[in-house]
Structures are given as C-alpha cells and as structure tokens.
Image (spheres, rainbow, N blue to C red):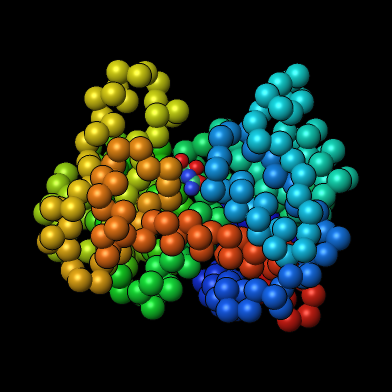
Amino acid sequence: MRHVISPQDLSVTEIERLLMLGDDIIARPEAYAESARHRKLATLFYEPSTRTRLSFEAAMLDLGGHVLGFSSQEASSAAKGESVADTIRMVQCYADLIAMRHPKEGAPVVAARHAKVPVINAGDGGHNHPTQTLTDLMTIHRELGSLEGLTIGFCGDLKFGRTVHSLIAAMRRYPGTRFILVSPTELRAPDYVLDGIRASGCVCEESRSMEAVMPDLDVLYMTRVQRERFFNEADYVRLKDSFILDVPKLLHARPGMIVMHPLPRVNEISVKVDDNPHARYFEQARYGKYIRMALILALLEQGKEGAIL
Ligand code: NCD
C-alpha cells in the first residue's frame, strides 16, 4: 500500500507522470468526471486550512467522488483525547483514502502505520507538505516549461516553513538546481535540509538580501513567517516583516522570473505585486486542485495495470 507522507515517497518518474496526468485533467476535465465514482475521501484536518482542504475536496468532487471529514481538532474526538491511531482505525472503515493535516511532525507516519487505505500528508507541523510540493512543481513546470537547471530563491521563514522543506527535497533531485536561501539568521533552514542539499550535489547559497539575489532567480518562492510555530509572540513580532516583496524590488528580476507563494499571504508580498507580470501565486493555488485530482486517482488505482503508482 502506497502512502504519500513526504515528497521522496514519489520517484522523479512518478512525479513526471502525475504532472502529465494533471495536464491532461486540465485539458479534458470531462474525461475524469466519473473517475472516482462511489469512492470517498476523508479530510482529517487538525490544523486550519483553506486551500489544501478545499482543493482536496473540490478535486474529489470533480472526479465524481464524495468527501467527509472534519476541519478542526475541536470538531473531532481528538478533543476527547482519542489518539491518531484510533481515529485512523475508524475512518478507514468509512473512506477509501485519507488526507490528513496535523500540528505534530510525524503524525501522518503513525496514521499510515495503522491505515489499510492510502494516507496523504496534507502538512505535518514544520516538517513536510508533499501535495503543496506537487502543486509547486506543476506551477514551475507549466509556467517555465522545465524543472531542470533552475535557480530558485526561497525567502522568509525557512526554519518552520514545511512547504520550503518539501520543495527543496523535491527540487534537489533535478539536475542543475541552484538554491538561494534568504532569511533572517533565526529563521535559517534546519541543518537536515541544508545537509540534504549538500548531499545532492546541488549548489546552495545563503543571503540576507532579497535585492542582491533578485537578478539571478528563475523562481522566487516567498513564505509567511509561521506565527503558530513560535514559542513567544515577541520573537514573531520582531521577525514577521523581515522581508517584504514590493514592485520596486522586482525591477531587477529577469523578464521570465516567477513569484510563487504557497499562501496564505500576510504582509510579505505587497498587494500591488498581485497584478505584476511576475506574480504566479494565484495560478499556483488553482493548479493545486488538478494535481490533487491526479494524486487521488493514482492512489485509488495503485497496483492496477498501467497505474502510475
Ligand atoms: C502552507 C502550509 O499550510 O504549510 N499553506 C498551504 O497549505 N498552502 C503555508 C502556510 O501556512 O504558510
């Protein structure tokens, strides 16, 4: 049984095939309108979400399937003290597939260990967010035409940002990726993420200046400072506005450079950037539904002849 807990659970070839399937779903949505008929997706969200949960649900509905689930810890028996393992034992009786978000790193691994249906990690603490990564890869692939030889700048909270950790783990597998990491010292990427880049042989540079690196970038991946993962509010307030992208900073960007953000945006991208030709973050959110449709189909069909997984 295949689960998707981290981006490395999918090979580069499997990702390529998922991206192709996503492209085909965008081109011919009607061909997939009944593909998950009578199948059920459970969305178990122990942490807030707008895009991830709703795009999972929209994806399942557009495949002709059904959704059930909860959108907060308080709305589930977790509030009464039920363990993740016990919740999963229940939910697998009611659904064919589980998408789960949890504040604790590793919770989806526990879930997968107890599940007889595929589990998708929809974000675990500051650790991983593989379906956001698939969304990001689809955005880069569709907007820039390739995933190889790109210089990608990550800016903001690289310590707690799980979308950053997951996308780095995915991009370091493509030849010629050059990483430029821009963050305050306190919010540098964790050592395990930096070690992973070094081991891959990809180039990795760190900077404290967005302006200085701007002309080098093919992709600028902005992130929100992750307030909910700070131990004290004073540190958050001190660091929250460290890097703000505005239109003047983009004057030094290459013509084809794209600005991405997993969203939600708080203050780190001026709303004036929204109409700028470099901005792609709303398109990125739109791709999220299609790539989740592809992943749901691949997991439901897994093991069958010609299946992706
Ligand atoms: C991200 C997340 O939850 O990690 N949001 C998302 O899923 N698109 C990023 C964030 O919350 O800052």
Image quadrant occupied by the N terminus: bottom right
Query: Residue sitting at 80 percent across and 33 percent down?
Result: 86
Query: Residue sitting at 22 percent across and 36 percent down?
Result: 242
Does residue 164 appear left or right of residue 212 in this picture? Answer: right
User: Looking at this view, is 307 or 135 the one in front?
Assistant: 135
Residue 157, image x and y in percent?
Answer: 33, 40
Residue 232, image x and y in percent?
Answer: 37, 18
Query: Residue sitting at 24 percent across and 34 percent down?
Result: 241
Q: Is residue 155 above or below residue 12?
A: above
User: Looking at this view, is 62 or 139 the one in front?
Assistant: 62
Any part of residue 267 in sight: yes
Residue 267, image x and y in percent?
Answer: 30, 38
Q: Quadrant of residue 153?
A: bottom left
User: Looking at this view, is 162 or 45 the one in front?
Assistant: 45
Does residue 69 appear left or right of residue 107 in this picture? Answer: right
Q: Is residue 142 above or below residue 59?
A: below
Image quadrant occupied by the C terminus: bottom right
User: Looking at this view, is 240 or 251 the one in front?
Assistant: 251
Residue 165, image x and y in percent?
Answer: 42, 49
